[in-house]
Amino acid sequence: MILEVLIFLAGLAALSWSADRFVFGASALATNIGVSPMVIGLTIVAMGSSAPEIVVSATASLSNNPDTAVGNAIGSNITNIALVLGITAIIKPLMVSSSTIKRELPVLLAVTLLSVYFLADGHLAFYEGVVLIILFVFSIGGLTWISLHAEKNDPLHSETADEIPRDVPPSKAIFWVILGLIFLPLSAHFMVDSAVHIARYLGMSELLIGLTIIALGTSLPELAACIAGVMKGEDDMVLGNIIGSNIFNILAVLAMPGLLAPSIIDANVASRDMYVMLIVTVLLIVFSFNVRGTRRINRWEGVAFVASYLAYCVFLFI
């Protein structure tokens, strides 16, 4: 048991590191060919933050653990909003002033509702995985269009520009992309395999391990990035990363079990977890959206998010 825990922690560390190196290399390559920082921030960086979830979901699906994969997708979205964004808002309230963010929020709600519809029958079919992955491709195009047509004074422009690597030689950027692509699936394999052993030892279901331990583990780097971002005053970029990551979690991460292991899903997904994901998503929109101008996610709203996450976890284990 102790060995499996050590393997899980080592796999998680390697997964986070390789995802970070992949994003660094891909962002540097995109910068070298002239892609704007805002496009990189809304697409490559957002996809990179979802890379651990994508490879973990694919690995779990190929290992015939679709419940773990589905739990990872839903649990990561719940964790990103209720825990990561909640803790970030408690540390420092988030100002939401970007018009780009306000355009992304309805997209997040739409794909969340689509996932609820797909999972409501307790079965994730192959064609549903195909629909999700096609929408994933279209979402990348849509986010690119949004970033290219964003207002010039949108604060997201300067915030993303400050975080994009510059003056990185192409050979170095390619090296980190390749290294990331090698270590991402390798570390995910050890992480998922050890997580399944831990779950069985503790009597936990595959769904529960995906909703909690794996989802929390893959979201910890996002927490560190959000805290660092909000302390530098990059509020809109923090929120943009969370929204983009959650969109990709639904479209790309949830697509993996549909494409690779279509099957009946644990009944708790349809009766409990997908509604929790929908509720926290709606709360995020209510807290963030204000047609009259800027809006702030206050500390008390952050406390409400964290309290809801803790209550959810207690309910799961009870």
Image (spheres, helix red, strand yellow):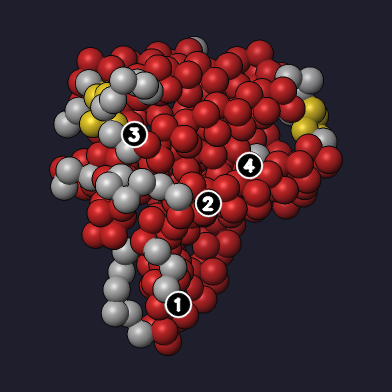
Instruction: Choose the circle earlier in sequence order: 4 or 1.
Output: 1
Instruction: Choose the circle earlier in sequence order: 2 or 4.
Output: 2
Distance between the Cα atoms at labels 2 and 4? 18 Å
Distance between the Cα atoms at labels 4 and 3? 20 Å
Disc 1, SS: loop
Disc 3, SS: helix
Disc 2, SS: helix
Distance between the Cα atoms at labels 2 and 1? 18 Å
The front one of 219 and 81 is: 81
Mark nearest the camera among 1 and 3 is: 1
Q: Which residue is mark 4?
A: 251
Pointer 4 local density, CA inside 10 Å: few below 14, some 14–19, many at least 20: many
Q: Which residue sits at x=32%, y=80%?
A: 168
Disc 4, SS: helix
Q: Are marks 2 and 1 in contact (CB under 8 Å)?
A: no
Q: Which mark is residue 145?
A: 2
Task: Say which amino acid is labelled 2.
Answer: Trp
